[in-house]
């Protein structure tokens, strides 16, 4: 798991702005993130870049539990760690998230 | 809360109460709902407790509705709160602490609890029932400290508890009063086979044993039986049966026999008080299984919301034992009696047993052991009270002379030949994986090598390789489900959805025991499709269970931009439309405009956030170039302009496209319509290909020009346009109802057989009309997705727009 050092939290909107199990792109400074709200209300923020060699976005994948199936190549990605599940390999950069009073904060 | 709403109180936060609430929420928002539960948890799936005990699931895995769900629907949930009575004069329910809550309507769904044998010593420490999470936790704790366990009761629950305790490392003896296990669900034959199998798995049995006393000091130390023999044990699970929880009903003066007495609409003897699930007694029967509570809940929900409903007339119950590796199933009447005709087959070598019971040639019950593949089919037939026929007999019992498997060409295939073109997997890699890793299924090969995981076109070849490498061991492989999340086949799932009236993918996955609770990218879209196919009028499409293309109504490209394809009925457009397409392409800076293989225009490279604007400005119907739906109808110019044309193919193409567009199908679907047998629109490679001739049309089906090229088969000839449209509709509906999700017609025709399709849609006129009626009904529900998205501005924002955060933290 990649952890952020000296992270600064940015407000990324109300939790209601994220549809359950449907990703949304959030741009913070120069970073493009794919933000997912799982069915239990947990929010995950990933770099919106497919770890597949051909790249592409992640935000449009299918969310199941804490896993993401990427929209282009159907790779299975663990949202807790960003790790791509076997037989494929790779890791997505994940960012820390906290929720306070319905407000989503993402750390860069 | 909202004072205008009727106050609906649910007593009991279990599966029956909450599934009724889920049904009510679908029908009406007129209730302000409050739920009281004695347990300190949100609603969970009690039938999966066995898996928690067995260790294959955690308690979190079996939660059906988490706290967010209650919040989302504005339901007030009181956990850890017991209602003791209902006061009808003041219309209030009263809690154990004496708090009062007003109601307009009440549903009692208190379920049932373990029946504890009233023998001396039953209240000692270390004696539990097996009913809820608390019991489950006690058992998990006991296994850490103690060695020997006894389970009193050799029924479904007792055996599942015993298996769980064995799994936890305990030495387990099942004590049973009768000579046969599960005697209420199995006949003596199946019961004996089950006992042998469980002994093999390490469970001991003491049969014909009547418990007289539990021995020990404060904590249980042994069981003394009626014949004075003694079994030493550190822990006792009572699983001798359940008793309906009727306390609150009795306190409130309701009519109670064994359970709370209800009529065919789940109404109790008190006005505005209803009861559902295991606590009820309907026509003298108390059910202890899950299927009836769904059926009861659905009827109650409709009744309470004022929606017309047929009365509840009781359920045909079926039983499945949830112990891994032991497949047992029974349904309907299963104990032989003289009025039954019995069809049975017992195979001691394969350790399988199958029995079907007939009364006056009507199927009334069945028992399966070892192989329960036919369970869904049998359940359906018995529910329908089907008559046994030669065909049914042959399909259920086999004809006894299985033909030889087809010779395959994989033997001669070179080792370095690529089998999976998407992921570059060779035959050699697959063969190595099978031999070195000991793989036995396509799914394992997929997980290990990546073969079949993208387009799936190579799956048949992979299957053949598997078969070839494993030889006779091939069938020994585990039963294949539709994906790694389940072992159920497509047909079993569809049958369960129909029978249990399941309505969401989540419900399907919970009720049918998915091993990944929210499914995967393979099964979620498939289940969403099956639900919509079965109930086109009430199914709420789940955007989150759609592939990105279908969710966005546009085709994603590898860089994350999209392709927009407007409809062009029959491949015909106008100069005005062309002009608009050109203007918009310039305005939104599309990267390419391309003519597709189906005679339409691709606008490639539209940004996601621009999609709604492009649709609005085009003001044309969606071409569904992204969907599992009717894509294009390719046409020649036909009799309008062609000197050879005998039929107006352009008009017929446009007519068919307008009629059948938008409907969800198992896979993408293409038509071609030709004005004459010269076949310029290439009917031979389309799902439905139509060729005009002098006296009418000839219909071809199952053609494919794609990954698995196949020439279409001639299905039939028709004389009139009306017959043509009717046959096309019947073919499409038959395909909708019987194909696997993502199965193209080329595969479907080969799997189902051209003759079968012809028999259904061409020869059986009655069925053809019925199919046409069903597709017409489904077509009434469709709507253009672009227009729909444009109307819903808020949803549109969340779906298509990103969020930009200013750099200020």
Image (spheres, coloured by chain):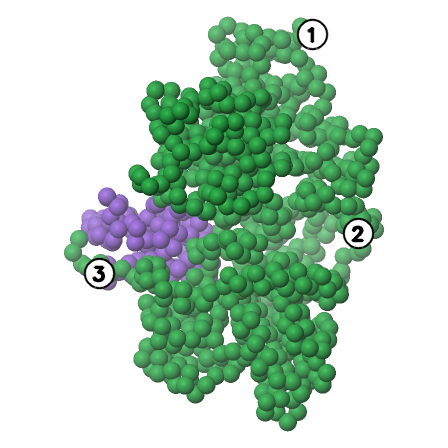
Q: Which chain is green?
A: B
Q: Quadrant of the N terminus of chain B?
A: top left
The answer to whether one can see residue B538 in this image is yes
What is the CA distance from the residue labelled 3 to the residue labelled 2? Answer: 68 Å
Q: Quadrant of residue B673?
A: bottom right
Chain identifier of the purple chain: A
Q: Position of residue B546 (x, y in %)?
A: 46, 58
Image x and y of residue B628, in percent: 53, 64
Judging depth in this view, the residue of B501 and B33 nearest the camera is: B33
Q: Residue at x 51, y 48 (%)?
A: B503
Residues marked 3 and 2, same chain: no
- Above or below B191: residue B677: below
Residue B11 placement (x, y as % from top left): 44, 29
Q: Position of residue B88 (x, y in %)?
A: 42, 25
Instruction: Please give the chain letter of the residue carrying mark 1.
Output: B
Q: Chain of mark 2?
A: B
Residue B378: in sight, yes or no? no
Q: Are marks 3 and 1 in contact (CB under 8 Å)?
A: no
How many neighbours does mark 1 have within 10 angstroms: few (below 14), some (14-19), or many (20 or more)? few
Rendered image quadrant of residue B214: top right
Q: Residue at x 35, y 53 (%)?
A: A19
Which residue is labeled 3 in the image? A29
Q: Which chain's residue wears label 3?
A: A
Question: Mark 3 packing: few (<14 Cα in 10 Å), some, or many (20+)?
Answer: few
């Amino acid at each position: 798991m990649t952890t952020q050092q000296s992270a600064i939290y940015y407000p990324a909107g109300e939790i209601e702005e994220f549809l359950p199990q449907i990703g949304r792109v959030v741009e913070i400074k120069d970073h493009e993130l794919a933000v997912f709200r799982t069915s239990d209300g947990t929010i995950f923020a990933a770099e919106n870049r497919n770890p597949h060699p051909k790249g592409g976005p992640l935000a449009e994948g299918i969310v199941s539990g804490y896993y993401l199936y990427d929209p282009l190549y159907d790779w299975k990605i663990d949202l807790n760690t960003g790790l791509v599940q076997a037989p494929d390999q790779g890791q997505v950069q994940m960012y820390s998230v906290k929720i306070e009073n319905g407000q989503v904060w993402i750390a860069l | 809360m909202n004072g205008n709403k009727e106050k609906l109180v649910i007593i009991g936060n279990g599966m029956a109460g909450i599934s009724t609430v889920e049904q009510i929420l679908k029908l009406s928002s007129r209730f302000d709902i409050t739920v009281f539960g004695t347990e300190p948890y949100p609603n969970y799936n009690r039938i999966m407790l066995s898996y928690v005990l067995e260790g294959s699931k955690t308690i979190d895995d079996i939660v059906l509705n988490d706290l967010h769900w209650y919040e989302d629907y504005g339901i007030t949930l009181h956990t850890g709160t017991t209602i003791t009575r209902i006061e009808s004069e003041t219309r209030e329910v009263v809690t154990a602490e004496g708090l009062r809550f007003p109601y307009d309507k009440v549903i009692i769904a208190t379920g049932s609890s373990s029946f504890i044998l009233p023998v001396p010593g039953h209240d000692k420490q270390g004696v539990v029932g097996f009913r809820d999470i608390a019991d489950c936790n006690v058992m998990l704790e006991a296994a850490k400290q103690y060695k020997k366990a006894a389970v009193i009761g050799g029924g479904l629950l007792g055996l599942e508890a015993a298996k769980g305790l064995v799994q936890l490392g305990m030495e387990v003896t099942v004590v049973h009063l009768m000579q046969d296990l599960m005697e209420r669900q199995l006949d003596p034959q199946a019961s004996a086979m089950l006992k042998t199998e469980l002994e093999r798995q390490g469970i001991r049995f003491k049969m014909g044993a009547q418990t007289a006393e539990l021995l020990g000091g404060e904590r249980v130390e042994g069981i003394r039986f009626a014949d004075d023999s003694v079994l030493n044990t550190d822990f006792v699970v009572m699983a001798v049966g359940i008793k309906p929880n009727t306390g609150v009903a009795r306190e409130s003066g309701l009519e109670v026999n064994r359970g709370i007495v209800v009529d065919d609409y789940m109404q109790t003897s008190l006005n505005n008080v209803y009861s559902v699930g295991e606590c009820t007694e309907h026509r003298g029967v108390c059910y202890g299984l899950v299927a009836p509570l769904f059926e009861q809940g659905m009827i109650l929900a409709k009744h309470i919301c004022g929606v017309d409903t047929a009365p509840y007339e009781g359920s045909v119950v079926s039983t499945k034992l949830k112990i891994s590796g032991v497949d047992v199933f029974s349904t309907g009447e299963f104990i032989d009696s003289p009025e039954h005709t019995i069809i049975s087959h017992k195979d001691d070598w394969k350790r399988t047993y199958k029995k079907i019971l007939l009364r006056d040639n009507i199927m009334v019950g069945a028992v399966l052991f070892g192989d329960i593949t036919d369970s869904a089919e049998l359940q359906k037939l018995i529910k329908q009270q089907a008559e046994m026929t030669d065909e049914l007999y042959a399909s259920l019992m086999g004809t006894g002379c299985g033909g030889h498997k087809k010779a395959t060409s994989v033997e001669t295939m070179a080792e370095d030949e690529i089998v999976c073109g998407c992921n570059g997997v060779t035959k050699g890699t697959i063969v190595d994986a099978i031999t070195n890793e000991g793989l036995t299924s396509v799914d394992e090969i997929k997980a290990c090598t990546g073969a079949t995981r993208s387009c799936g076109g190579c799956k048949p070849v992979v299957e053949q390789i598997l078969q070839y490498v494993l030889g006779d061991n091939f069938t020994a492989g585990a039963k294949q489900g539709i994906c790694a999340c389940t072992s159920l086949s497509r047909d079993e799932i569809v049958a369960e959805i129909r029978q249990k009236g399941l309505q969401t993918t989540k419900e399907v996955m919970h009720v049918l025991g998915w091993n990944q609770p929210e499914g995967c990218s393979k099964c979620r879209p498939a289940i969403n499709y099956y639900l919509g196919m079965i109930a086109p009028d009430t199914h709420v499409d789940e955007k989150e269970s759609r592939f990105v293309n279908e969710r966005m109504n546009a085709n994603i490209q590898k860089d994350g931009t999209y392709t927009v394809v407007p409809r062009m009925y029959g491949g015909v457009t106008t100069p005005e439309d062309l002009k608009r397409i050109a203007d918009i392409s310039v305005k939104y800076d599309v990267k390419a405009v391309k003519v597709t293989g189906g005679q339409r225009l691709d606008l490639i490279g539209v940004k996601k956030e621009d999609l709604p604007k492009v649709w609005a400005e085009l003001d044309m119907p969606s071409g569904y170039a992204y969907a599992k739906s009717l894509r294009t109808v390719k046409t020649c110019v036909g009799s309008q302009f062609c000197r050879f044309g005998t039929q107006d193919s352009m008009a017929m193409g446009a007519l068919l496209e307008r009629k059948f567009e938008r409907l969800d199908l198992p896979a993408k679907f293409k038509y071609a319509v030709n004005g004459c047998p010269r076949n310029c629109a290439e009917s031979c490679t389309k799902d439905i290909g139509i060729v005009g001739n002098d006296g009418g049309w000839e219909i071809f089906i199952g053609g494919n020009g794609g990954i698995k090229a196949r020439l279409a088969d001639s299905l039939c000839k028709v004389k009139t346009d009306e017959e043509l449209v009717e046959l096309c509709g019947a073919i499409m509906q038959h395909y909708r109802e019987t194909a696997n999700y993502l199965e193209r017609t080329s595969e479907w025709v080969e799997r189902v057989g051209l003759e079968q399709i012809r028999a259904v849609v061409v020869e059986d006129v009655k069925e053809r009309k019925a199919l046409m009626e069903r597709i017409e009904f489904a077509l009434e529900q469709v709507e253009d997705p672009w227009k729909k998205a444009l109307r819903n501005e808020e949803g549109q924002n969340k779906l298509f727009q990103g969020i930009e955060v200013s750099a200020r933290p």
